Amino acid sequence: MTGRGPRGERGEQADKILAAARRSFATRGYAATSLRSVASDAGVDPGLVHYYFRAKAGLLEAAMQPPDTFGAAVAAAAEQPLERRGRAFIQATMQLWEDPASAEILRSIVLTAAQESAAMQRLRQLFSELVLAVVSHSLSDAERSLRASLIATQIVGMVMNRYIWQVGDVATLPADTVVDLIAPTIQRYLDHPLPADLADPGAEG
C-alpha cells in the first residue's frame, strides 16, 4: 500500500527523515528540533517532512515507534512455555540491543523520552504493553501489572547501565553472561508467588 509515512511509495526518503529526526530529538531535544533542521540533516526538501509527517508532533510519534523486530521478538518470547519465558524475554531484549541498527533506534527512543514528557508517556505505554504480553494472561489484571512492573525494573536497569550510561561491570560483560545472571530474576517475577500482602485481595486463598 502506498501513501504517506515511512512505508509509502517514497519510503527511502521518509526513512532518512525519520533517522535524522531521531538523532536530533535524542541530542538536541524535542523543543530545539525544527522540521527545517531535520530536513537539512536528512538532505531532503522541507516540504517532504510535511508531506510524510504533517507536523513535528507526527514526526515525534513516528520516532517513538520501536523497530518491527522488537514487537516480533517479544511476541515470540511470550509464546514460550511459562517456565522458559523469563530467559526468552531477556534474550530477545539483549539480541535487539546488541544489533547496531535496532540499538540506534531504541537508544534514540530512550534519550528522547528522557527529555520530552509526551515521548515518555508513549514509551511507558509501549513498554507496558510489551512486558504485559510476556506475563501469564491467566492472572488477575492487578497481579499481571505488578509482575510486569517488577520485570521492567530489571530490563530498564540493565538497558540504562549497559547501553545508555555504559557504567559498571554489566556494560562490559558478554551478552550471554548478562542473560544468565538476569534471567532467573525475571523468571521469579513471572511465576513465583507474590508476598501475601501483595496478593490480589479478590483471589481465593
Image: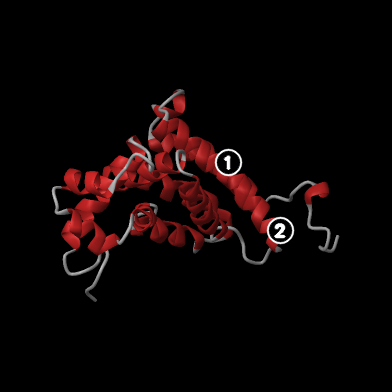
Give the x, y percent position of residue 109.
Answer: 39, 45
**Image check: 95 left or right of 12?**
right
Closer to the camera, 145 or 114? 114
Give the side of residue 199 with respect to residue 174, left or right.
right
* Count of numbered tags: 2
**Tag 1–tag 2 contact (CB < 8 Å):** no
Image x and y of residue 114, in percent: 46, 39
Give the CA separation, mark 1 to mark 2.
Answer: 17 Å
Q: In the depicted view, which residue is nearer to us: 35 or 18?
A: 35
Pick out the residue farthest to the right: 205
Label 2 neighbour load within 10 Å: few <14, some 14-19, many 20+: few
Q: Which residue is mark 2?
A: 142
Identify the residue shown where x is 70% and y is 56%. 143
Does residue 161 sit above or below 124 in this rendering? above
- Residue name at image x 39 percent, y 56 percent: 61
Q: Which quarter of the figure has residue 27?
A: top left
Q: Counting residues from the N terminus, which is met first, the one under dot 1 or under dot 2?
A: 2
Q: Where's the N terminus, which quadrant?
A: bottom left
Q: Quadrant of the C terminus?
A: bottom right
- Residue at image mark 1: 153
Q: Amino acid at mark 1?
A: Thr
Q: Is residue 90 left or right of residue 103?
A: right
Residue 200 vs residue 121: left or right?
right
- Foreground residue among 180 and 141: 141
